Image (cartoon, grey):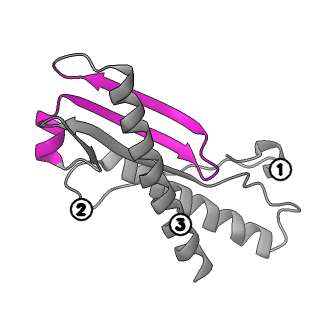
């Protein structure tokens, strides 16, 4: 979601440590890393080191799954370790998919279940992007 050509001869390294979580550390890292990246690039622009804004869109990630036959957003450790289907979904603020990774832990899931989980993930990502926008607007 970054125009790499706009960065010039720069490298961005994002190293996220999730200090406290009960599941979903990978998705929390992706969501938080985007905020850190946005903030760093804003600083470069503010300092006159970038001529254009390289951010194309926001990025956030959530976990979803089927736990006791119920679609669940943001699985905690107990849900994640015992769910029938587990997915990580990374999306843009505009609603496009960056990554969809899903695994049936027991019985296979069908297309209808997949669609329900993707819809749930999209709603979760929309909430996270709103939170990212609000947090970055305060700085």
> What residue span does the magenta drawing correspond to?
77-106
Residue linked to disc 3 = 130
Q: Which marked residue is nearer to the observer: mark 1 or mark 3?
A: 3
Task: Left or right? Give the position of 22 relative to 46.
Answer: left
User: Is 86 situated above or below 20?
Assistant: above
Tell me the residue at 27%/32% (across/down): 86
Q: From this viewpoint, which residue is outermost toward the front?
A: 112
Q: CA distance from mark 2 to mark 1?
A: 34 Å
Contact? badges 1 and 3 (CB < 8 Å): no
Tell me the residue at 63%/50% (across/down): 12
Give neighbour class at mark 3: few <14, some 14-19, many 20+ (Cα, 10 Å).
some
Q: Residue 47: x percent and y percent?
A: 79, 75
Residue linked to disc 2 = 20
Q: Nearer the viewer, residue 52 or 11?
A: 52
Q: Nearer the viewer, residue 89 or 29?
A: 89
Mark 2 vs 1, N-terminal side: 1
Tell me the residue at 57%/83% (across/down): 138
Q: From this viewpoint, which residue is outermost toward the right?
A: 51
Contact? badges 2 and 1 (CB < 8 Å): no
User: Is 23 situated above or below 80?
Assistant: below
- SS at mark 3? helix
Q: Residue 120: x percent and y percent?
A: 39, 46
User: Is 42 situated above or below 63?
Assistant: below
Tell me the residue at 24%/29% (across/down): 85
Q: Which numbered marker is on residue 6?
A: 1
- SS at mark 2? loop
């Amino acid at each position: 979601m970054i125009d790499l050509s706009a960065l010039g001869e720069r490298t961005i390294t994002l190293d996220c440590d999730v200090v406290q979580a009960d599941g979903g550390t990978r998705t929390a890292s992706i969501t938080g890393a985007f905020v850190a990246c946005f903030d760093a690039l804003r600083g470069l622009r503010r300092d006159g080191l970038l001529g254009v804004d390289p951010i194309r869109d926001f990025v956030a990630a959530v976990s979803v799954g089927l736990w006791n036959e119920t679609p669940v957003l943001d699985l905690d450790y107990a849900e994640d370790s015992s769910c029938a289907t587990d997915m990580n979904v990374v999306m843009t603020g505009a609603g496009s998919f960056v990554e969809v990774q899903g695994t049936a832990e027991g019985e296979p899931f069908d297309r209808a279940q997949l669609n329900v989980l993707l819809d749930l993930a999209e709603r979760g990502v929309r909430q996270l992007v709103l939170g990212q926008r609000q947090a970055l607007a305060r700085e």
